[in-house]
Amino acid sequence: MPPLAHALGWDETVYVSQYDPRVPAAFFSAPRSRGISFLTAPFIAATPSVLVLRIGLTLLSSAALYAAFRVWRPVVGARTTALAALLFAGLWITQISGPQAMPNLWVAFGAVAATGWFLRAVTGREPRAANWWLAGCVAATALFRAPDVVWLALPLIATSLFRNRRTLPYLVGGLAAGLAQWVAEAYIRFGSVQDRLHVSSATEGDMGLHLNFDNAWSSLNGPLLCRPCTATLDSPGLTLWWLALPLLAAAALAYALRERRFLPTALPMAVAAALSVPYLLMIDYSAPRFLLPVYALLALPVAGLVTRLNPRRGLVLAGLLIAAQLVSQATVLTRVTASTALTNERYRAAADGLRTLGLRPPCLVSGPRALPIAYDAGCASAQVDGNNLSTTVAGLLDRAAKVPTALLTAKGQRPPHYARDWTPYPLHHTPGWTAWLAPAAPQGP
C-alpha cells in the first residue's frame, strides 16, 4: 500500500509504541490487547522504518491467510477453500488491513483456523493433533482481542458439549492460556478483571443493548473509524454484497441440510454470528474492520454454495459476479487508502511542525490527536479527558513544568483554561491545527 508506506495511523501508533525503544509508550486503554504490539515488536526494534514494518506485516498476513484457510481443505475440499480465501482477501478492508498494525484481521485468521481445527478434531481421524492446534489458535487469538475470543469460544464450547467432550479441555485450556496475560494486566493496572471490564465498557461508550446495524452500514465503504458515526453511505451500489451475504449463507445452510453436511456449514455461521454480537448489538459506533472475522467465516459456506453449482451458465454467472465484486472492492480500496494516507500525513506534518518549534525528547503533547502526533515527534502523550484519559490537569501541568509541552487544538478552537497563557503557533500543512507551547521549563545548572 504505497500511500500508507511512511506514516502510521492513530491506533497503530498506540500498538507500535508499546515496545518501540525510541519513544515513550502511548496510553494503552482497557479494551486493547497486546497481540499486535508483540507481533510488531521485532520489526520496530530493528528499524524505525514504517515501510519495513508494512512489508513485514504484508508478508506475515499473507502467510496467515494461507495457513488459516488451508486448515479447511480436508473439511470442505480444495476448491471451496481456495474460493473462500479469495472472497475474503478480495474485500477492501481485508487488503488495507494486511499491512496495518491492527488486531481485527488477525482475529479473523484465528477464528477461521480455530473453527477448522475444531471440526477436524470432532469429525476427522486426527483428533490429537487437531486438538493441540485448536488450543494454540484460540490462545493466539486471545492475545489479539481478548473479548472477541470469548465470543469465538462460546459456539465451540456448546458444540463440544453435545458432539465431542474430549475437545473441551483443549478448548478451555487454550482460552485460559491466551487470556492469562490480559487477566494479569487487569489486576496489575486496573485492580481486577471486573474493574477492567467496567473501564473498558466506559471507554467503548457504555456497552449495552445498542442496535448498531445502521452505523455498520454507513461505514461499510469507509471511513476507517466512524465515531461518532455521522457518515453517510458512500457508493451504495458497491455494498450489495453486504445485503446478499446473509441470504447466501442461508441458502448454503439449506443446501447443506439437503446434503447432510450440516456441521461444516452451520458452525462457521454460528461462530460468525457470535463474533458479530458485540459490534452489531452492544456498541454505538462502528468501523469496517470490526466485522472482518464475520466475513472470513461466512466466506466458507458461501464458497461452498458456489462450488456446488452444476449448470455451466450458473458457474459463468457466479464467476462474473465475483469478478465484479473484486473490481468494486478495488475501487473502494483506492479511495479509502488515499483518504487514510492524507490523514496520516497530516499527523506527520504536525509532528514536523512541533520539531520546528523546538520540541525535542523528552517532551509531552496533549489535546485531540495527541497520540499519533506525539509518536511521530518522539514525545510522550497525555490526555486529561476522553477515551484515552491518562492524567489529571494537575499532573499535566506538573509535567509541563519539567519538559517542553505542547497542547493541540483544532481550527478555531480555544485552549482549555489552564493553557490560556500558553503561546500559540499555527502548524503548517494541517487543517488549521494550532500548537500551544507551555512556558519554557526552567533549565538546570
Image (cartoon, rainbow, N blue to C red):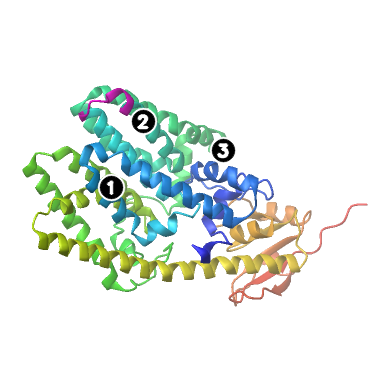
- Horizontal and vertical percent for residue 234? 34, 73
> To which quarter of the image does residue 118 belong?
top left
According to the image, label 3 marks what residue? 189
Q: 10 Å neighbourhood of mark 2: few (<14), some, or many (≥20)? A: many
Residue type at mark 1: give it: Leu
- Horizontal and vertical percent for residue 289? 39, 56
SS for tag 1? Answer: helix
Residue type at mark 3: give it: Arg
Residue type at mark 2: give it: Trp
According to the image, label 1 marks what residue? 297
Chief secondary structure of the magenta portion: helix
Q: Residue at x 28, y 37 (%)?
A: 116
Q: Nearer the viewer, residue 212 or 1?
A: 1
Left or right: 347 as drawn, with respect to 35: right
Magenta run includes residue 129: yes
Tag in front: 1 or 2? 2
Q: Nearer the viewer, residue 67 or 221?
A: 67
Q: Nearer the viewer, residue 122 or 78?
A: 78
Left or right: 372 as drawn, with respect to 281: right
According to the image, label 2 marks what residue? 133
Q: Residue furthest left?
A: 258
SS for tag 2? Answer: helix
Bounds of the magenta segment? 123-130
- Horizontal and vertical percent for residue 208? 34, 50
> To which quarter of the image does residue 316 belong?
bottom left
The Cα atoms of the two marked residues, 3 and 1, are separated by: 34 Å
